[in-house]
Image (cartoon, grey):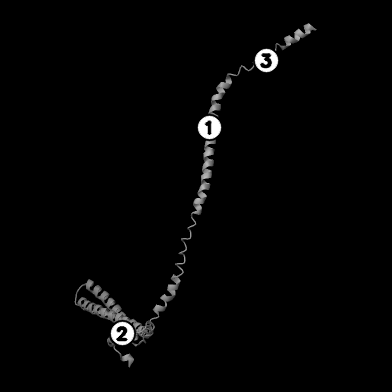
């Protein structure tokens, strides 16, 4: 008998069942029972509600698609008739194109109707979807682990190295002084060569030549 169920009738039936389950769940939430008792009562009803809502959503989606296809097919059938009554090559081309579209839509409609009938007879299954995000959630938990990044607080150790950087600065300063002093010496040495030309009369030490005169005197004394 299940195969004889009309899709629209099944949709209406599911809508009523969903409303009843939602009402039952609301009554449980508003009751004075303990939370664990509420949870125990809610779990099976919520699972049943999810399954019926999933099936209802699928049936409604397929039913809406069939309505859209019916409207498109009716329009295409009218176009085909209009082009048949028209004269000219263009009208014939348009009619051929409309017939192709019509055939495609009719095939899609047949498939959608078959899917709808199949969906009507399918057993209601609790959506396993909530189980898949559960493993994803723990997968996201390790992500907050990189939070210990603020550990780089030992950066104050780097400023401790900064005084060391001051020493090379002093060395550079000394090197700058040395270079400057060398440049000054070079300048002085460049200025000194002209002064060095004045002591050129150094050949004067050759004057001790009169020493032989004393030798003559000694010989005379002899």
Residue in the image at 55% along x and 30% along y: 185
Q: Which mark is residue 206?
A: 3
Residue in the image at 54% along x and 25% along y: 191
The answer to whether any part of residue 212 appears in the image is: yes
Of pointers 3 and 1, the one earlier in the residue sequence: 1
Q: Which residue is mark 1?
A: 183
- Mark 2 element type: helix
Residue in the image at 22% along x and 77% along y: 75
Q: Which residue is mark 2?
A: 27
How many numbered dots are placed on residues in this image?
3
- Mark 1 element type: helix
Q: Is residue 160 left or right of residue 77?
A: right
Q: CA distance from mark 3 to mark 1?
A: 38 Å
Q: CA distance from mark 2 to mark 3?
A: 136 Å
Residue in the image at 78% along x and 8% along y: 219
Q: Is residue 54 left or right of residue 199?
A: left
Residues 98 and 195: in front is 195
Of pointers 2 and 3, the one earlier in the residue sequence: 2
Q: Quadrant of residue 128?
A: bottom left
Residues 115 and 157: in front is 157
Q: Which residue sits furthest top?
A: 220
The answer to whether any part of residue 125 appears in the image is: no
Asked if 171 appears above or below 88 in the picture, the reply is above
Quarter the C terminus occupies: top right
Mark closer to the observer (2, 1): 2
Image location (x, y in percent) of residue 109: 30, 81
Q: Which residue sits furthest right?
A: 222
Residues 100 and 179: in front is 179
Q: Residues within 10 Å of mark 2 (few under 14, many from 20)?
A: few
Image location (x, y in percent) of residue 29: 32, 82
Tell me whether the residue at label 2 lies in contact with that at label 3, contact meaning CB atoms closer than 8 angstroms: no
Q: Quadrant of residue 9?
A: bottom left
């Amino acid at each position: 008998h299940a195969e004889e169920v009309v899709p629209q009738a099944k949709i209406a039936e599911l809508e009523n069942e969903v409303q009843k389950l939602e009402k039952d769940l609301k009554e449980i939430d508003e009751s004075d029972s303990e939370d664990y008792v509420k949870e125990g009562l809610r779990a099976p009803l919520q699972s049943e509600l999810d399954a019926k809502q999933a099936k209802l959503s699928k049936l409604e989606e397929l039913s809406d698609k069939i309505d859209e296809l019916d409207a498109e097919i009716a329009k295409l059938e009218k176009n085909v008739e209009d082009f048949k009554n028209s004269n000219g090559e263009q009208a014939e081309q348009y009619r051929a194109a409309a017939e192709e579209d019509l055939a495609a839509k009719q095939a899609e409609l047949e498939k959608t109707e078959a899917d709808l009938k199949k969906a009507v007879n399918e057993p209601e299954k609790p959506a396993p979807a909530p189980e898949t995000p559960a493993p994803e959630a723990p997968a996201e938990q390790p992500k907050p682990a990189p939070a210990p990044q603020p550990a780089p607080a030992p950066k104050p150790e780097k400023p401790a190295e900064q005084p060391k950087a001051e020493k090379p600065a002093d060395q550079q300063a000394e090197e700058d002084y040395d270079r400057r002093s060398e440049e000054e010496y070079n300048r002085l040495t460049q200025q000194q060569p002209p002064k060095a030309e004045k002591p050129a009369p150094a050949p004067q030490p050759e004057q001790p030549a009169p020493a032989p005169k004393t030798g003559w005197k000694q010989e005379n004394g002899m």
